[in-house]
Amino acid sequence: MSKSDQMTDLAERRMQTVRDHMRLECELDFDAVIATFEHPRYEINGLARVYDGEEEVRRYFEQSRTPFPDQGNELISIAHGGDTVHIEMYLTGTHLGPLRIGDKVVPPTGRTFRIRMAAAFEFAPGSDKIICERPYVDGSLIAKDLGLV
């Protein structure tokens, strides 16, 4: 296999890892999501909020799924470049649990949201295991879509 073919194969495997990762998040199979990482790490909106290591990432899953247990995603586009896979998607969910907005907790409304966002998935050189997911989303858009602001 030529070096070019190896790079194409690695890019395809990485994009499949991202597709699997996103699907497993929707299925709430967090053990399998953790297995897509070499080291579990989320940097929400860059470095604004970091969840580093399995225990913290599992805490992130709990925090994000408590208000939106059916949180889902609809992939719009996916691209590979360097050691990163970039995606655009619609994030969806139904407000079925308590939602913290600042210092206020909003009880479930049963309303749904659908917002557009992007994410970058960083991979270790030569690997198809994720070392960091960086989702970029304006959380105020979720509250706005839910009619809370």
Image (spheres, rainbow, N blue to C red):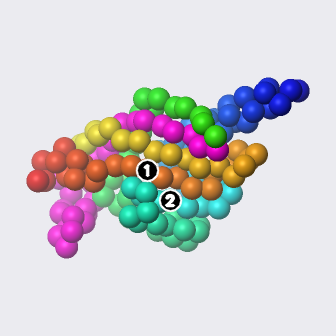
Residue at which label 2 appears = 42
* 75 in relation to 124, above or below: above
| Quarter of the image where the N terminus is located | top right
Q: Position of residue 97 (x, y in %)?
A: 28, 59
Kindly check if marks 2 and 1 are in contact, taking CB atoms under 8 A apart as contact: yes
Nearer to the camera, 99 or 96: 99
Q: Residue at x 38, y 64 (%)?
A: 48
Q: Which mark is residue 64?
A: none
For the point 70% across and 44% down, the residue is: 128
Q: Quadrant for residue 66, please give it.
A: bottom left
Instruction: Give coordinates of residue 43: x percent, y percent.
Output: 47, 60
* Residue type at the position of mark 2: Tyr
77 in relation to 125, above or below: above
Which residue position is annotated with label 1?
Answer: 135
At 59% from the left and 34% from the top, the residue drawn is 80
109 part of magenta stretch: yes
Does residue 143 appear in the picture of this structure? yes
Q: Residue 22 vs residue 113: left or right?
A: right
Give the x, y percent position of residue 94: 28, 46
Whole-number angstrom distance, CA of label 2 to CA of label 1 = 8 Å
Span of residues in magenta: 83-111
Question: Badge 1, how many Cα within 10 Å: few under 14, some, many 20+?
Answer: some
Q: Report helix, strand or loop for mark 2.
A: strand
Give whichever of 106, 149 is nearer the camera.
149
